[in-house]
Amino acid sequence: MTAASPPEILRAPLVVEFPFTRSLGPVQSAFLTGLREGTVLGVKTSDGKVMVPPVEYDPVTAEEIRELVEVGATGTVTTWAWNDRPRSQQPLDTPFAWVLVRLDGADTALLHALDAPGPDAVRTGMRVRVRWAAERTGAITDIACFEPYDGPAGGEAVPHDGDFADAVTGIVAEARLDYVYSPGRAQTAYIAALSERRTVGERCPSCHKVYVPPRGACPTCGVATTDRVEVGPAGTVTTYCIVNIKAKNLDIEVPYVYAHIALDGAGLALHGRIGGIPYDQVRMGLRVEPVWTEGGRYPDHYRPTGEPDADYDAYKELI
């Protein structure tokens, strides 16, 4: 008798990214425009402290603050950590130190990178100065990094009107997370079933709720879920939203509908796109079924089955 081979451990690289766009108020606009012009600005709070980077509201009184001051481009390291394996898009592509630097004239510290030959060259209390980027656009990256400095200290903060030509009024921050995902026992079985065009959840032995996708344990009862249950394929729209903004790299024309769908036999709803019906005709209680594309590993979308709408009492606990 031979032992069964262990199940394949699934792993896949995943990337979560989105551009975060925001407009800038007068304080942040002045700060970033100042960096573009090689000037570091802070803001003075009601108790006379100078904060760099500046904030728009006093952290103690919550009052709006607008009193801008210019501080030095030199400062002192207040604490640090060595980064021996820089990641993509970090300030430097060689090992460096993350440092908190209290610039001359400021009372708070600014987080940035310090270009140093090794951790032995970094210490709390060391003097540093800004190394400006060769090309500046009005972003925190206009400070390329900090570098060791043994010159004289800067003076006190001096008032600044914050006026610059062609002020920066908005920014786009590209947020990105790269990681390797391993789904574990429960979701591995779920993914394997999807490859066979089946949807399999797991039932809690205590409360009997069927989780789809399965989680391996019931979050309510705290016990393992090992009893696998096939659900669907049809289900009921419990709630939905109309998407009017086209996502990057998503080849779906807007507007379209994204819904919570309670598959028959499931104890909670999952997400899915609704197709095969005008977006303004989608409704709560609509009965839908999955549509698979050739070679697809999961339903492309859900379409109406043609059945009568489900009664509200049949799905109200799943909204």
Image (tube, helix red, strand yellow):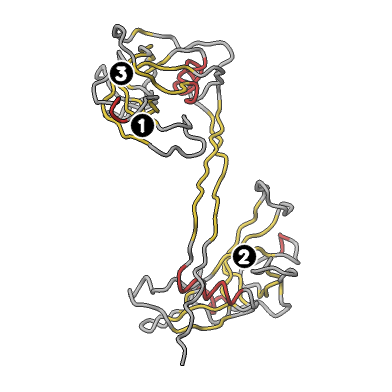
Query: Mark 1 vs mark 2: which is more N-terminal?
Result: 1
Q: In this picture, is 113 found above or below 135? A: below
Secondary element under disc 1, as helix, strand or loop, is: strand
Q: In this picture, is 5 found above or below 86? A: below
* Nearer-the-camera pick, 40 or 118: 118
* Nearer-the-camera pick, 253 or 280: 253
> Local crowd at mark 3 within 10 Å, few (<14), some, or many (≥20)?
many
Q: Position of residue 63 (x, y in %)?
A: 33, 26
* Nearer-the-camera pick, 288 or 284: 288
Number of the front mark, 1 or 2: 1
Which residue was labeled with disc 3?
50
Query: Mark 1 vs mark 3: which is more N-terminal?
Result: 3
Query: Mark 2 vs mark 3: which is more N-terminal?
Result: 3
Number of the front mark, 1 or 3: 1
Residue 98 is marked as: 1
Which residue was labeled with disc 2?
272
